[in-house]
Image (spheres, rainbow, N blue to C red):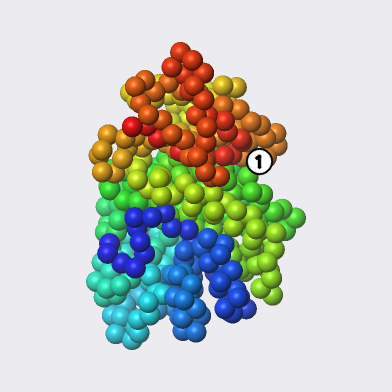
């Protein structure tokens, strides 16, 4: 996908930049917050000029016909509602702009519409040579978790979420899977299972994983903390996420956005800026590797494994790293990674996953052996000390919810 988005780097996006937040000062603040692109942007030419000035891209809605799967009552109706002529007319009417990176073609479709979406995505990819078609999928709590005796419409269009993702991969010819998951409005166990399903599908089909996470809240009295943001980002990176998209920057849905309804910064701005800066510190080294598998270390009997179709292990040995674990037995989500250029170097992307709800944050060590290897460790604040404890055992200090990339050559 040779488009304007640089796919060799980890990109950070947000949903929504409403008209009240499109002054030059606002867009400079957006870039300063570490944002690469905005989803659901209007085709607002003065604002897009400012995007281009500050190096921000836009995934623009309203160019291609809109579509949202909603509560499932639209399932299977995409072709009838938006025939191919409407996409062709959109392409003919389109006037390009260097800040437009992507064309929004819909949100959360049913699998019943995936075969037609295959045609749509292929056409949009060809008809807009500088842009890619953007399509976001349901999370695994769509439909089934909300069905009851009164509501039996199936949002997913399949019997299971695994099948939903499988049908997408079979029918939609793009090199990514993007889905949204709002952990603090659902739960951790479904987050892990959703990551597992999508990340494995990406690995098995050669796609990259993009994920939409929450910086806002579904309850007015709650504000996402820095550690809430860390936990979402670093567990996603342990599963190989290559695009992280935060919802919402301005009003879009729910409460406590990064900017309020008048365009003023809320407490979320500085939190998001800090976490994005941490991700940036890790990103260049992280993107040298690709995910092979992800392991739940120290989660035996943990309630967060209740709905995860994968066994927890007491420690991890990969053939390069041995006996990887937390010295206090804390749970770790560990992504096993190999160098994209096959130069023999490997890495572990680790999230210290003991305290997602920030109830009892701790400091402890990740310990491991890596015989005859040169080892480095990178965290969100920079390179970390790798301490040799003797007997070939190394230790890296971490805090709850922190992410660390441990590399070995």
Residue 64 at what x, y percent from top left?
A: 38, 76
User: Could you say which is closer to the camera, residue 108 or residue 378?
Assistant: 378
**325 above or below 220?**
above
The C terminus is located in which quarter? top left
**Residue 361, quarter of picture:** top right
- Establish if 387 lies above or below 120: above
**Which element carries disc 1, helix, strand or loop?**
loop
Q: Is residue 161 visible?
A: no
The quarter of the rendered structure image containing the N terminus is bottom left
Q: Position of residue 113 (x, y in %)?
A: 34, 62
Residue 16, percent across and down? 54, 69
Specify the quadrant of the image occupied by residue 117.
Answer: bottom left
- Name which residue lies at 59% across and 79% down: 23
Would you say residue 291 is visible in this rendering? yes
In the drawing, does residue 351 fall left or right of residue 104?
A: right
Q: Residue at x 61, y 36 (%)?
A: 400
The residue at which mark 1 appears reads as: 357
């Amino acid at each position: 996908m040779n488009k304007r988005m640089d796919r060799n780097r980890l990109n950070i996006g947000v949903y929504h930049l409403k008209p009240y937040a499109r002054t030059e000062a606002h867009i400079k603040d957006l870039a300063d917050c570490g944002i690469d692109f905005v989803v659901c942007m209007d085709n607002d030419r003065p604002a897009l000029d400012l995007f281009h000035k500050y190096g921000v891209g836009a995934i623009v809605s309203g160019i291609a016909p809109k579509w949202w799967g909603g509560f499932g009552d639209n399932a299977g109706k995409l072709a009838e509602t938006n025939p191919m002529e409407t996409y062709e007319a959109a392409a003919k009417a389109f006037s390009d702009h260097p800040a437009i990176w992507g064309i929004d073609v819909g949100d959360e479709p049913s699998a019943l519409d995936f075969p037609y979406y295959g045609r749509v995505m292929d056409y949009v990819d060809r008809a807009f040579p500088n842009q890619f078609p953007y399509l976001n999928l349901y999370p695994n709590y769509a439909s089934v978790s909300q069905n009851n005796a009164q509501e039996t419409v199936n949002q997913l269009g399949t019997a299971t979420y695994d099948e939903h993702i499988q049908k997408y991969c079979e029918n939609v010819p793009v090199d990514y899977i993007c889905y949204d998951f709002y952990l603090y409005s659902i739960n951790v166990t479904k987050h892990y299972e959703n990551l597992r399903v999508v990340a494995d599908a990406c690995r098995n089909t050669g796609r990259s994983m993009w994920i939409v996470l929450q910086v806002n809240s579904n309850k007015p009295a709650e504000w996402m903390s820095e550690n809430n943001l860390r936990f979402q980002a670093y567990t996603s990176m342990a599963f190989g996420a290559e695009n992280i998209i935060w919802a919402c920057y301005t009003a879009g849905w729910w409460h406590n956005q990064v900017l309020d309804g008048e365009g003023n910064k809320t407490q979320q701005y500085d939190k998001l800026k800090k976490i994005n800066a941490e991700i940036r510190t890790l990103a260049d080294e992280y993107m040298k590797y690709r995910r092979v598998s992800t392991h739940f270390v120290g989660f035996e009997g943990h309630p967060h494994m209740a709905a995860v179709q994968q066994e927890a292990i007491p420690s991890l040995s990969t053939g390069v790293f041995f006996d990887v674990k937390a010295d206090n037995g804390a749970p770790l989500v560990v992504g096993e990674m190999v160098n994209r250029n096959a130069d023999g170097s490997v890495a572990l992307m680790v999230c210290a996953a003991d305290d997602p709800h920030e109830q009892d944050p701790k400091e402890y060590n990740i310990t491991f052996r890596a015989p005859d290897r040169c080892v480095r460790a990178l965290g969100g604040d920079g390179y970390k000390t790798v301490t040799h404890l003797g007997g070939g055992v190394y230790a890296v200090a971490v805090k709850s919810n922190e992410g660390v990339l441990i590399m070995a050559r």
